[in-house]
Image: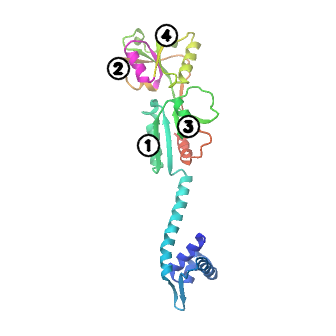
Amino acid sequence: MELRHLRAFEAVAEELNFSRAAERLHVAQSALSRTIADLESEMEVRLLDRNTHGVALTEAGALFLHRVREILDDARDAVLQAQRRSRGETGTLRIGFIGTLSQSLLPSLLQTYRAAYPAVELVLHELGPTQQRERLLAGILDCGFIGLAMDSPDPELETIVVAEDELVAAVPENHPLAKHEVLRLPDLKHEAIYLTAQANAPIFNPWLVRLCQKAGFEPRIHGQTDRAATVLNYVAAGFGVSLFPARIAAQATFGVRFIPLKGRLPKYQYKFAWPRRSTNQALSEFVKMVRRR
């Protein structure tokens, strides 16, 4: 038994006329009669009474018609759902992100995507770059907004640069350097520098050290903490200074002054990443939107 048998029976049962049913299905009446005969033979049930006045459903035929309609509706719905999934209109998208992007790029992008694909479930996870990469490769995340600066290509991930930031110095408000409108990186060579933990900044911290070395000094790193907010508390308390992407400076912090750095310094890059072998169609549509942003 195939769907064509069920569609043929539905048409005849609703039209109660083989000629009209054949016209509705765009088939020859003789072919339609054979299809119904084959169906009844396979089922070993008489579904229709045929006489000179037309066609009538048997009791078994009426019962069968009810189920046939449900089956055909389910089949049409299954096709529709498969088509929508293939177009990325349904499904689930598990997105990782670093906190730095949670108040700038991410909200507007998610709002635009949500408007275009309201049936896709979005699940957000705030995680550091290392945790995101691990979860991307394990299939726990579908994609992630990762703050990776100047890193070499990852053989297992596709990446797109989604934002860039200038580097700024964070100094205590009462520090002598706070009087300056701009600073040079060597101005910090005698200062105690506090950074976020290496696990949370696996690319940024080494990149920062290399920048200082190129500027002619070895940075005096006095401490590393889990969160940028804690680093800023150390700075505000006068323990030392720090360096951040300018996006951090947009978040006003009591007791801290953010000062731009002059000189030909490379920009810090924020990247969007996803597994090269992903088959998630919702992700494919999201990637297109990220590229167009």
Q: Residue at x 50, y 23 (%)?
A: 166
Q: How many marks?
A: 4
The kind of residue on which mark 2 rests is Phe
Residue 254 badge: 2
Q: Is residue 171 above or below residue 277?
A: above
Q: Is residue 65 above or below residue 90?
A: below
The kind of residue on which mark 4 rests is Asp
Residue 9 found in image quarter: bottom right
Q: Which residue is mark 1?
A: 111
Dots 4, 1 in contact, CB < 8 A: no
Residue 136 badge: 3
Relative image position of residue 110 (x, y in whole percent): 46, 41
Of labels 1 and 2, earlier in sequence is 1
Disc 1/disc 3 C-alpha distance (Å): 23 Å
Q: Is residue 129 above or below residue 190?
A: below
Q: Which residue is mark 4?
A: 187
Relative image position of residue 195 (x, y in whole percent): 48, 19
The kind of residue on which mark 1 rests is Gln
Residue extent of the magenta highlight: 226-246
The kind of residue on which mark 3 rests is Leu
